[in-house]
Amino acid sequence: MKKILIMLLIVAFAAALVLGGVSCKKEAAETTAAETAAETTAAAAGVKIGYSMPFIEDSPYCFPFSKALKSSAESRGWEIILTDAKGDINTQVNQVEDLAAQDLDGLLVMPTDAAGIVSVLEKVHGEYPDLPILISNTMTDPAEIDAVRGFAGPNSYLEGKQMGAEYVKYVEEKGLDVINYCHLTGMAGYGAAIDRENGFNDAVKEAGAEAKFNLLDLQPGDWSPDKGQTITENWITTFGDELQMIYAHNDGMGIGVVNALKAAGVEPGKIVTNGCDGQTQAVQMVKDGWMLFTIFQSPISDGELSMAVMEKILKGETVEYFTYLETPTVDASNAEEYLPKAIEIWGAEY
């Protein structure tokens, strides 16, 4: 009986050891898995990105763009710091320097001034050579500089050519010998404004149509609907029936043009104009015949593209210097198709 009891105790002890070992191994495995998951989460959460913007809330384009940046960062587990230069290049220079000093993993910059931003980018690159810098939405001048890894966003020069080509087609279809036009540019020194002006002029030149485009006046509207409207009101007063066309660099100013035309009692299509961005109001104006066309440039897709390119850079992947956003033309033939897309991106107000 005693031997049997001893044997039972030995078996029970051995079973306890086995079960205990299994339990320990399971707990160890669970601990290792938890630690690995925590480390992965911490690594993702540890990525800190800085983005220097010329505007945020003061721009119909930059505000949804900034929201896209935040959501893209959140989906990746990244921290993102946004700064708003309020359209001032000196403010942006200081903000870029401040961002670079915050132990970032990556820095993105949308230049307020295409040429004016270059020196601080070179300075930051010299001080933080391992910090990848990506230019976003608006190119520098010159377009390629050694201090940055590349550019992601719309090709504003090609957008200018798109718009110039649309007006050349209009002149040809109408059989006009000459069209008298005014030119509303974006903010002076801003890369997109420079590119959209040069692209337009080159498209007209390449089409051999320079003699058909008679420039009456050129003024900066600073991307603003209010300024676009005020300048257009002055042009209507100054040029009267002589004015046939107003080339605008963005939807905001184009919307301002249309508002001025409506207030002056001008019939749709008598003075042709355009937009560029694909805002809801602009697409609706194309559909209604107030605008000849707009260029569909989604701020959501634009922001997401920049974050996707930065992610590739941080992973050590090779990226081309230029990564462009697709920007289709919206005209009377497809405005109805694009209107729901515009509402989804911009809402009904813009």
Image (cartoon, grey):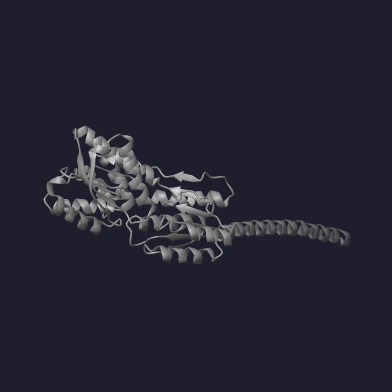
Does residue 310 appear to the left or right of 159 in the view shown?
Answer: right
State which quarter of the image contains the C terminus: bottom left
Q: Is residue 123 visible?
A: yes
Residue 259 relative to residue 32: left or right = left
Image vertical order of residue 2 relative to residue 250, above or below: below
| Residue 308 appears left or right of 58 | right
Total labels drawn: 0
Image quarter of residue 219? bottom left
Judged left or right of residue 199, residue 239 is: left
Q: Residue at x 33, y 62 (%)?
A: 58
Image coords of residue 298 (percent x, y) = 36, 48
User: Quadrant where the N terminus lies?
Assistant: bottom right
Residue sitting farthest toward the right: 3
Which residue, as the protein is rendered here, is positioned at the far left? 265
Foreground residue, 48 or 126? 126
Name of the residue lying farthest toward the front: 211
Vertical placement of 25 versus 214: above or below? Answer: below
Residue at image x 32%, y 42%? Answer: 201
Q: Picture coordinates of residue 231 (x, y %)? A: 21, 56
Q: Which of the pair 141/69 is nearer the observer?
A: 141
Is 37 in front, or is 102?
102
Instruction: Please tell me which residue is depicted at 41% across the width and 45% down the height of the picture.
Output: 325
Pinpoint residue 177: horizontal percent, then vertical percent: 19, 35
Residue 237 percent location from the top left of the image: 13, 54
Closer to the camera in the image, 216 or 102: 216
Would residue 266 be seen by someone viewing this image from the given angle? no
Give the vertical position of 32 relative to 249 (above or below): below
